[in-house]
């Protein structure tokens, strides 16, 4: 007989084993971002190689999520994926005890009612946070002005994207703050301070109906046209080679639910070109301008690589990479979780999809993303393919090199 754990038992186990205590056995928490007092923990992801912590744990929700590779779950999920064990083994590893007898109909109904009440409470809380983030993102985007005549134009020119023969939704802010959190000395609290203020390109993130959902921010270097700014992280631990750690010169504010950056979108389009990074997608649009293809093509950018494929049904072992424990890294696999409500949607009118794959990112991980999006967007009469840039390059490199 298969073992069964009641919801009450699972909650008891979680309360006795906060997620930070479970995950903390296998990662080193980043002191500059972690707020122990609030049960808010950050670390480099144990499932994929990275230098800047994007793996987030919340004791209050008993959940983890990596904003780099997309893995997420609770204590049991983490142990299942990290140790490659079954759900039952994970529960028992944390001291869980199976129900000796099946629950009564009343107990089952009570458990279901508690789960539903908790789900609604969490959804309401998350939706309030989402709306607040969208409001803040809208404010940032509205502060942006035209790109022409600014350092933003030089950034586009340095990327080989000028002159443009079509309009873009991009905006420019000459002095946009870059906020970074740091621990307050002698306290468990954290404070946010400005570590950089300078020119930034702003791209709107919109949903399936064109509604504003967020803003994608790219901080640029006015002294080096076409390059992003290098922002040193003043609170990060020095690297092993002694070199300073740098912050990612991009930020996203708002919501990623069913979202993308729609650079060009003609009415009645039937072809979609979509890539990671608006400079990459825009490079293909520039190259195709003036052709019959351009007239019927929308050029979109996914918010990040994993967003293009949406959530995976499960993770799989990377054939080459290893985590800190020497085990294969786990990456989101090729089978999409079709119940994911946040996955990127494309219109039914699209009959041809061209995905852009960067040649300078991990090919195996990117291939899983492409397979998930292919399965998610498959429709009768729709053709799909993935165009890969040459090894070590993206399509902007191809465009610039062709000039």
Image: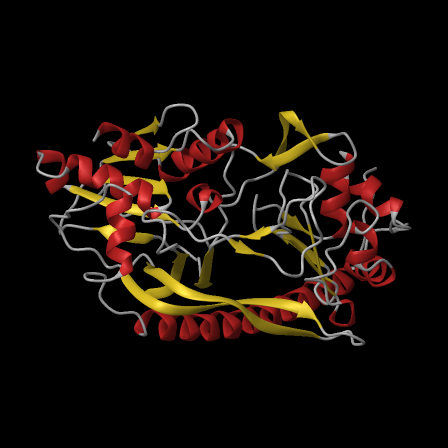
In the rendered view of the protein, which quadrant contains the C terminus? Answer: top left
Give the residue at x 51% y 75%: 128
Q: Can you say whether 382 is above or below 148 in the image?
A: above
Q: Position of residue 319 (x, y in %)?
A: 63, 23
Give the residue at x 57% y 40%: 313
Q: Position of residue 349 (x, y in %)?
A: 21, 44
Residue sitting nearer the eye, 281 or 210: 281
Q: Position of residue 228 (x, y in %)?
A: 41, 50
Residue sitting nearer the eye, 365 or 287: 287
Question: What is the number of callouts on the image?
Answer: 0
Residue sitting nearer the eye, 401 or 313: 401
Residue sitting nearer the eye, 255 or 218: 218
In the rendered view of the protein, which quadrant contains the N terminus? Answer: top right
Give the residue at x 24% y 31%: 381
Side of 162 relative to 33 (left or right): left
Side of 341 relative to 403 (left or right): right
Give the residue at x 27% y 48%: 347
Q: Can you say whether 134 is above or below 99 in the image?
A: below
**What color scheme is it?**
secondary structure
Side of 186 relative to 51 (left or right): right
Q: Position of residue 337 (x, y in %)?
A: 52, 43
Q: Is residue 129 visible?
A: yes
Q: Is residue 211 visible?
A: no
Quadrant in the picture for residue 327: top right
């Amino acid at each position: 007989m298969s073992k069964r754990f009641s919801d009450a038992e699972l909650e008891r186990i979680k309360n006795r084993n906060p997620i930070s205590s479970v995950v903390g056995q296998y990662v080193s928490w980043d002191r500059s971002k972690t707020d122990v007092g609030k049960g808010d923990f950050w670390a480099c992801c144990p499932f994929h190689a990275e230098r800047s912590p994007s793996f987030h744990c919340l004791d209050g929700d008993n959940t983890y999520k990596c904003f780099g590779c997309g893995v997420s779950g609770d204590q049991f999920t983490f142990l299942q994926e990290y140790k490659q064990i079954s759900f039952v083994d994970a529960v028992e590893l944390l001291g869980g005890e199976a129900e000796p007898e099946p629950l009564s109909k009343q107990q089952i109904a009570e458990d279901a009612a508690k789960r539903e009440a908790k789900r609604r409470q969490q959804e309401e809380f998350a939706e309030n946070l989402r709306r607040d983030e969208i409001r803040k993102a809208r404010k940032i985007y509205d502060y942006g002005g035209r790109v022409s005549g600014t350092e933003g134009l030089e950034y586009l020119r340095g990327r080989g994207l000028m002159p443009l023969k079509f309009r873009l939704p991009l905006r420019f802010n000459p002095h946009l703050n870059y906020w970074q959190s740091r621990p307050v000395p002698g306290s468990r609290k954290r404070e946010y301070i400005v570590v950089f203020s300078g020119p930034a390109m702003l791209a709107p993130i919109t949903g399936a109906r064109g509604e504003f959902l967020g803003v994608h921010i790219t901080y640029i270097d006015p002294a080096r046209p076409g390059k992003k700014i290098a922002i040193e992280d003043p609170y990060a631990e020095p690297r092993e080679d002694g070199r300073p750690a740098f912050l990612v010169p991009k930020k996203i504010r708002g919501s990623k639910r069913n979202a993308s950056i729609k650079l060009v979108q003609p009415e009645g389009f039937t072809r979609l070109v979509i890539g990671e990074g608006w400079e990459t997608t825009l490079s293909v649009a520039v190259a195709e301008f003036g052709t019959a293809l351009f007239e019927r093509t929308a050029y979109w950018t996914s918010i990040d690589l994993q967003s293009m494929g949406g959530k995976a049904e499960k993770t799989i072992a990377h054939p080459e990479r290893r985590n800190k424990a020497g085990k294969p890294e786990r990456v989101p696999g090729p089978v999409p979780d079709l119940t994911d409500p946040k996955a990127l949607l494309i219109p039914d009118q699209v009959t041809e999809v061209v995905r852009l794959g960067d040649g300078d990112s991990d090919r195996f991980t990117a291939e899983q993303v492409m397979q998930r999006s292919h399965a998610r967007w498959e429709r009768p009469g729709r053709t799909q393919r993935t165009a890969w840039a040459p090894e070590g390059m993206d399509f902007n490199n191809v465009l610039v090199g062709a000039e």
